[in-house]
Structure formats: structure tokens, C-alpha cells
Amino acid sequence: MEILNLKSKVEDLNRLRQIITVLFEAGFGFIIDRLRLRYLVPLRLRLSQRFKRLKAPAKPEIKPPQVRLRESFEKLGPSFMKLGQILSLRPDLVGFEYAKELEKLQSRAATFSFEQVEKIIQKEFGRPIETLFKSFEKKAFAAASLAQVHRAVLKDGTQAAVKVQRPNIEETIKKDIHILFFLAFLLEKYIPESKPLRPTQVVKEFAAWTMRELDFKVEATNTERFRYNLKDEPDIKIPKVYWDLTSQKVLTMEFVDGVKLDEEERLAKMKLSRELLASNAVKVLLKQFLIDGFFHADPHPGNFFVLKNNIICLHDFGMVGYVSPEMRSEMVSYFMSFINQDMENSLKHLLDVAEVREGSDVEGFKQEVSSILSAWFYSPAKESIATSFFKAISASVKYNIVFPSNLVLLGKAMLATEAMAKRFYPKFDFNEQFAAFVGMVYRSAFDPRAAAKDFQDNMFDYLAFLKKLPEHTLKLLEKFEKGDIGVKINIEEFIEVKEEIDRQNDVRILAGLTAITLLTSALVMNIEEARIFGISLGRIGLLIGFVLIIWLFNLVRKNK
């Protein structure tokens, strides 16, 4: 990013001047002054402000800063609306008041003309719109910062929703990202207190998120992945993607005629179980987070439809989050420790997923998080687990400790889902369902079938390791004998090393044997013919497996 060459680009400079002017008019001149960019504000506006100060009229009513910022983003167009939407997901950075106000950007985008829609579709598919669709409504029924959606009918009569990208939006956003990097650079240079918020990193994440969202094939792939992950959930529907009418700038999907969660009047006319809907909304998020590791990062009411028979339809999968298996394991352990009021392990598992850097105040962070957790542990009027969790990770900014952005997005998604659930059914007990689900996931980790599946997934790695182990061990011993490692040891030390290697080999071989026994047992469990004296071979194998596990634990303990 050529930050320092920005001034040589007239087009970028004009856009920068526009951005600075809008922010100045909104009352953010004090920040512009600190960034040393006041010279970009038109002279008439600067003089007008000075005149107002001299005149000193009665103090007018001033809108809250978060409202002025949201209005500024609306004036500055799609790039800043998308930036505002992403910042609305990061109250840990901007605060809850700003995040709540910026959420309003979700439904305030203007539409563009049907003529432009026709041109984009023809360019993407090389054919006129009338040859692709049986009918196509000219008026968009929804619009967002990057695209708008039209209702259409496919050639076979299927109802479809067609999402069309805004014209020239990619070029506009790339230019604005360049300017945002420049502004982030100035923030870190001239406003030191902004450094814990990592402005440059925020812009990098914004750029990555937005460029992914501009490729509708990525969103289509995300949608199909959600359809696969949730295929066994009868209370959840994910729209189908029509790939032959999908490209980088056009996404065609099944049209789902549902009621949005914020349409109270229409919801009231439906025969719904609000308690069941609330439970389904929470269940689907928890499955995404704790089991699938792939979750909807923007679950606001506009992205949820309610269908007949208490079915929830999710859509708009442009923004998704990922939780690695290792992080899922740590978070399940954290939540179990939290639910069991185990302060020490709660702090341990939380810090295990954080990035502690030079200058991080770990003790200060621990003290504040301990205070947050204690309020949940010992207060009779408990706030939600989601709120306590998000408060804990949000506290990291002031202590120069960084949590993965995906984990922060997950925390915000938990808060949003809980809010929707309680909007449906005010008596809904989020903590109870959350604790039950976490407990189920935690216990399933000790299920022999899960262990067998894990072994099966990694079987080739284990076999490759075991196959190479004797060769590597012999090479190591030969190097010890020849002194090639450059370490002088006496014969007693050598014998101790050899015995330790032998013991470790015993542990590895026994662990492999245990995993193979459990895997085989799980595979034959449901085979009726696999019996001895009427007893299932699978059950016998599981019993042997448990004996081997006990043996393995004893062997490991002796080796310590």
C-alpha cells in the first residue's frame, strides 16, 4: 500500500478531501486537527466555523457522536457503510453505543437502476437477461451496501432471488481502502492512544472481509457449506444456490417467502411457538460454533426468516467466521470451567487462545476478567454467559492483549442471537440451553466413537509416524554413539536416554493399539453377525479398549 504517495494521485486526493469535509461538518474537526489534515477542509467551512465561535450563539442541540458518525458513513457511500457494518460487529473496539448505532446501516442503502442491473447480468453471462430468466422484477425488494436483490422466475418456473452487485463498487472500495490505510497510518502516528485499537489491522481485516464479500462465488460456496452442515436439522432451512446463474457479481438462489424476525405484526398472525423458535435460533448458532467451526458472523434480524411450522431460514452468508478444532476445544474447556465456577482454569483457557505480546499487562487483564467472572459466579441475578464472555474478551484491548477476530465475531454473534431469542420469547433461559449444549459437546469428546473417528481421520499420519519411528530412533542412537550430536555423555547417561526412548516407544505403541481397538470396535458395533457366544464383538472390543486406556494412563504416570 503506497501510503506516502497518496498526495500524488489527484483522484485519491479529491476523495480524501471529500471524506475529511464530511467528517468536519459532522463535528469531528478535533480529530482532523490531530491528524494534521485541516488544510483539506474547504476555506469557507473553516471560516464559517470561526465565525460561529466569535458570534457565540446559544448552544444548539448536538446529536450524539455515534449518530453523527453513522450519518457521515451514509453520506460517504457503500465503502463506509460496509466499514460501519463491520465495526458494528466489534463493540470491543468501538464500544457498545457506537456498535448499536452502526447496526442501523444494515437497512439504509439506496437502490440502483434496472438498466444497470441488465448490463451487469449480460456482462457476467454473455446473454441478455430475458434469455436467462422467465421473468425478472425490475424493482429490487432489498438493498445493501454492496448489492441489491430482485425477485425472478427461472425458465423452469422456479421462484428465485437474484443478488446483483453494485456497478463499479469493487473499484470504488479499492480506492477507499487505500485512503483508509493512509488515515490509519496517521492515527497511529499522531494519536498514540489509538494504537491499542490497532487501526491499521482493523483496515486490513476490513479489506479482507470486503474483498471476499465482493466475490459472490465465495458466498455461494459458504451457503452450500451451511446447507451441508445443517442438513440434519429439520427446524432450519438454507436456500439452494443455482450455480448456472451465479458468477462473481451475480448470485441466484432459491426464493424463500418468510417473515423477518423484526416484522412483529406479521409474526403475530402466524401460529408459532415462540419458545421453540428462540431455542432453535440458539441451537443453530451453538452447533455452528462448537461443532462445525463455521458460523454466520452477522446474525441480525434481517438475516433470519421465520417459516411455517416454526422453521427458521438463514441467508446472506457473505460474512462468516471460522473456529479451528484447537480453538473449539479450548473454548469448550473455558465454558465448562466458567459454568463450574472454576476461576483458575477459566483464565487459563481464555489466555490460551489470546495473543500475549511484549508490553501486554497479563496480570491487569486477569484481575479485570476475574472481577467480571466473579460477578457471574457469585451474583444471584446472573447476566448471560454470552455477555460475560464478551465483556471478558473486550477487556483485552486496554491491556494490549489480542484475541483472534473470529473469536470476537463469535462473541458478538452470541450476543445477537441471545437478543433475538429473548425478543421472540422474553422468558427464554439462554444460560440453561447454553450450559446444556456445552456439556453435551464436552461429554461427546470422551465418547469412544468420537475417539475412533478422530483416529480414523488421522490414521495415515499415525501410521506414517509409527513406520518412521524405529528408523529415526536408530539414527538418533547412532549419532549419540558417534558423538555427532556434539554432546558428551557417560555410559550411565546413555543407558538412561535409551531406556527413556524405549519407554516413550512403549507409550506410543500402546496408544496406537488402543486407538485401533476402539476404531475397530466402533466399526463392528452395529454388525449383527459379529458376535462370540452371543456377545457383540464391538462391546468386547470397547471393554478391551477401556482396559488399554487405564494401562496407558498408568504407564504415562510412571514415566513422569
Image (cartoon, rainbow, N blue to C red):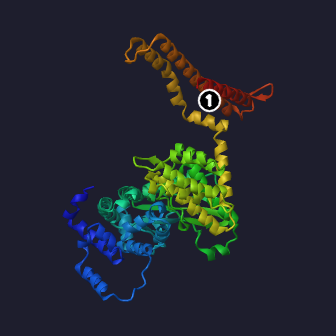
Looking at the image, which residue sits at the far right? 533
**Amino acid beneath label 1:** Ala
Side (left or right) of 486 relative to 384: left
The residue labelled by disc 1 is 515
Q: Nearer the viewer, residue 361 or 202?
A: 361
Residue 404, horizontal then vertical, whole percent: 46, 51
Image vertical order of residue 215 relative to residue 78, above or below: above
Q: What is the x, y in percent for residue 13?
A: 23, 67
Q: What residue lies at 53% left-to-right and 68% top-to-bottom?
A: 302
Give the crowd class for mark 1: few <14, some 14-19, many >=20 residues within 10 Å.
Answer: many
Question: Where is residue 515 shown, x and y percent of the image?
Answer: 62, 29
**Element assignment for label 1:** helix
Query: Is residue 221 among the parts visible in the rendering?
Result: no
**Image quarter (top left, top right, bottom left or bottom right) of the C terminus:** top right
Instruction: Say left or right for 268 vs 140.
Output: right
Is there any visible trace of residue 70 in the rendered image? yes
The image shows residue 538, relative to residue 379, as above or below, that is above
Tell me which corner region of the image, top left, top right, bottom left or bottom right, holds residue 7.
Answer: bottom left
Taking the spot 27% from the left edge, 85% from the top edge, the residue there is 51
Question: Is 405 situated left or right of 263 in this image?
Answer: left
In screen coordinates, is 250 left or right of 442?
left
Placement of the N terminus among the 4 image quadrants: bottom left
Closer to us: 83 or 460: 83
Q: Residue at x 43, y 49 (%)?
A: 360
Query: How many numbered callouts?
Result: 1
Picture residue at 50% right of the left edge, 22% below the top = 467
Q: Identify the residue at the far top of this view.
A: 491
Q: Nearer the viewer, residue 417 or 192?
A: 192
The spot of residue 127 in percent (x, y) is 37, 63
